[in-house]
Structure formats: structure tokens, C-alpha cells
Amino acid sequence: MLELFLKKPNEMELRDVETLRTPVGDEVKIKVMYGGICGSDLSVFQGKLNHAKYPLRPGHELVGVVIEAGSSAAYQVGTRVVILPNTYCGKCVPCRRGETNICEKKESLGVTVDGGFSQEFLISSRYVMDIPDDLPDERAVIIEPFAVVVHAFKKVNITKETSVCVVGCGNEGMLAAALAYHLGGRVTAIDINPNKLEFISKVGEIRAVLPEDLDNETFDVVFEAAGTKSSVEQAVHLVRPGGALVVIGLAKEANLPVAHVVRNELTLYGTIIYNFPADYRETIEYLRDPTFNGASIVSKILPFTKYKEAFESALSGDFGKIVLDFNNIEIADGGQEESTAKK
Ligand SMILES: [Zn+2]
Ligand SMILES: [Zn+2]
């Protein structure tokens, strides 16, 4: 079986490892179909995420099919599934409130424990959800990153009257703009990269501008999805008096103009990943809706053997989401192509 392996930051290789053991108990063996490359995969690759552990198999945005099931597994062989890449204990105080996203014992696949950029992997079926038949794999691979946005939107109420600004048009920012537009909001998206602004126009009638092109405007709701100090500091000043700032990006720190926040009664929300299974279910419903255009943020699907090109493209910042296809093996040096049948 082939897998991607990160010995240490910036040293990734494709390697052949032994076939996996048979799943036991509630475990399932998954044959991976697609794996999306996330901003956090890039941070892990570059050694920029402090809590990442090496050596590591990266990858957490995964869809696949169950090919073997333990005796008490929740899903049968043949079920198409999406992975929940953040574990939860089910016992701590947040877990008992249904807030699995802030579980005190959370582990993150592809960050603190091995992920799933491999042809197959084993996982407890409690971290697996089935994908409805009418949702193709190409769209389902967005479930995990989109669930982050669906969860963030729980903090605010977006209607036809709402003016929304999204700061940063990476994958999460683009999905936030797509969802705000889908819900009827008047959406402005800003990014420092003109290529990103071009992409955003594909998901709906969204005004896409460079940060400097905003003319002292303010918005009911601002989503911060760039995750840098300066973007957070700008985002605070884009909120209208009485409005809300929802911070999705993970800037380490930023200067907060407290008097400005207080005098204008701004509300600040932090939001992290999603609650399982509720946010996943809701996300799947959005993706089943043909009028929702968020899946068009996928700009490239590459065979996973071309992981170098895929990571380079993702790191360039010039594309939407890059997805690895684990069902398609293209041997780079020999030039031969071996492609297993795709469904
Ligand atoms: Zn991710
Ligand atoms: Zn817990």
C-alpha cells in the first residue's frame, strides 16, 4: 500500500508500506477516494504548526469507501463515507454539552496523529459518516472544510438584509463567501491575491476587491479567514457599530482596539472546526442542494502520486482547493499510467 509520509517539516515522500491488518471491533478499513489539501496540511508540511507531531502521515479531508468492517462497526462494506478527523472523548464537560469541537482530549488526524493520505487506512466507525448516494465524491470531499464554515455561521444570522464581508479568500474564506451568498447576503470578499478574487466570482455574485479598495465601508457581519495579524486588525474596523466579527483564521495574536470594540458594541466570536455529527449533517444538506455552488472552489484534482505538484500548487496560493485522487496512480518517472476504474 502506498502512503504519503512526512519525516520532518519539508521532507515528504511517497512510500510503500505493508498491507493493513484486518479491522477489529468498531473499526472499518477505508479505501480512500479523494483527499483535499488544507491550509493546515501546508502548515504541517512547512513546520509552522507548533502542536504537529513528526514523523507523520498527513491528510484529514478524506472521502472513501468501507472495504472491510469489524464485528461491531457501524457501517457495512461498500458504504461511501467521509471522515471526522478530530477525535472526541464523549465524556468531558464540552463533549457532554455536544461541543465535541472543544473536547479536552481532542486529537487531530494528520496533525497530532497519523492522517489518511494513503490508499487505505483503519479508523473507528465513530469517526465516520455515510455519504448520500446523490452526493458525488468530488463534492463530498468538501464536507470537512465546509463544516468549519457551517459551524462558524451558527454564531450569526445571515439573511437577505445582511451585508457580509469575508476577509481572506483561501478555502475557508471562499466557502464562507459561497454560503453567505447562498443565504441571500450581500457579500464582499477581500484578498491580497488578485487570482483568488477571480476564483470567488465563480461561486456567485460576490463583490471581490483588494483590501485597499474598500472605502471606509462597514458590514453587519465580518468573517476573518486569512489568519494573519494584519487581517484580524483590519477586520475589526470593517464591522459596523453593533455588528459582529467571526474569527475563523488562526492568527497567533493581534492588537485589539478595545475602546473601539466597546464604544461600538462589537461582538467578537472565535470558532473552531465543528460539532459532530450535527454540523456534518447540515453541511451534507447544503452540498446536496444543487443551487449551492461552493464545490466549485475545487480547482484541481491530481493523482496522489503527483503530490509534489499538488502541494506546490496549493502553496502558491494561486488556486482554489487542490484535491488528491487516491484511486488514480500515475508513476512519475516511468511515464506509465495505471488507473484503476473510477466509479
Ligand atoms: Zn482542513
Ligand atoms: Zn471530550
Image (cartoon, helix red, strand yellow):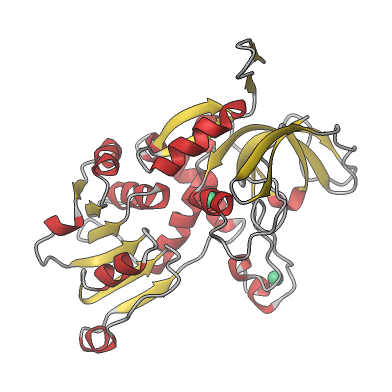
Residue at horizontal 23%, vertical 43%?
194
Residue 81 seen in this snapshot = no
Residue 164 visible in this rendered orientation of the protein: yes
Left or right, 147 with reference to 126 = left
User: Residue 303: horizontal and vertical position, in percent?
Assistant: 57, 25
Residue 196 percent across, percent down from the top left: 29, 43
Q: Please state which of residues 164 and 118 is positioned toward the viewer in this rendering.
A: 118
Say which quarter of the image contains residue 226. bottom left
Q: Which residue of the protein is positioned furthest toward the left in this rendering?
A: 215
In the rendered view, would you say 219 is above or below 40?
A: below
Residue in front for this viewpoint, 271 or 156: 271
At x 72% / y 55%, what residue is drawn?
113
The vertical placement of 194 against 259, above or below, is above
Q: Is residue 239 left or right of residue 89?
A: left
Instruction: Judge left or right: residue 319 versus residue 61.
Output: left
* The C terminus sits in image quarter: top right
**Residue 1 image-quadrant placement:** top right
Ligand 2, seen in the image, is in the quarter at bottom right
